[in-house]
Image (cartoon, helix red, strand yellow):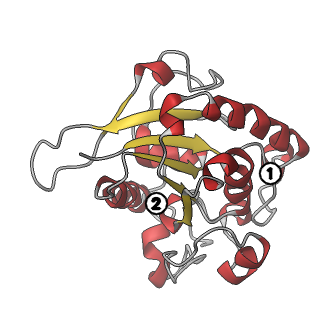
Amino acid sequence: MPPTLILVRHAQAEHNSTKDYSLHDPDLTELGREQCVELREGLMADPLAQQAELIITSPMRRTIQTALATVDWLMEKGVKIQADAHWQENSAKPCDVGSGIAEVAAEFPSIDYSTVDPVWPDKTSPAGREYHYTKTAIIARGQAALQKLYERPEKVIIVVSHSGFLRLGVTGCWFFNADYRVFDFGAMASAGSPYQLEQHASTQEKGGGLGHSWTQQVILGSDLPDELPETE
């Protein structure tokens, strides 16, 4: 049986507060660190989160910082935390391009980086085409990310990721900073059919586990470019 997924958006980062998207791989703000306190309490009070057997995080600084500040209590119980490039943010703006693994591993050594795609953090070259900022690439990346989790043996997995990718590549749901939603995999119509998620009523009806997110749905891939911008 495929796992239940707890999908988390990182807390507020410097580019969220300043709208300065030229910041490279920004850190959490002071408000973001305060948001992590509420998120941590919310996850600790969630019976499903208590059962989590694996934590996945985007290798970007803001997601790593959010994970370490909010699921440290699971890590203390021996739950493994892995970085996965599939869960990075969509665009190729500096704020959405990660730092080299050697750099983040030196600063955040408690995370397993061994399965991060060697192409990281490339998002624009032919080698990094899986991470290109196009509708086709992002929807395909969402499917690849879900396939990896569908085949995992754990019953509950927490993923710390980004609003754009979670909304447009994976769920169709809005995620505000430091909020989360819970999903099960839907039944597969046939072999090779797309992976689909079904949200738990507990997070759907109130707009996230903490109630901070919009309840409206969007179509996967909507507003994403069909082609790479010429400047990329």
Q: Is residue 131 left or right of residue 210?
A: left
Give the mark nearest the N terminus, 2 or 1: 1
Amino acid type at image mark 1: His
Q: Residue at x 45, y 63 (%)?
A: 227
**Position of the N terminus by quadrant:** top left
* Quadrant in the rendering for residue 147: bottom left
Residue position for label 2: 134
Where in the figure is residue 187, as x and y percent of width and height?
A: 19, 38
Tell me, yes or no, whether the two marked residues, 2 and 1, touch with CB atoms within 8 Å: no
Which is nearer the eye, 30 or 20? Answer: 30
What residue do we see at 70% from left, 76% from top?
105
User: Which residue occupies 56% across, 66% down?
Assistant: 83
**Three-letter code, disc 2:** Thr
- The picture places residue 158, in percent across and down from the top left corner, at 51, 47
In the picture of the structure, the residue carrying the numbered disc 1 is 15
Res 26 → quadrant: bottom right
In the image, farthest residue toward the front: 77
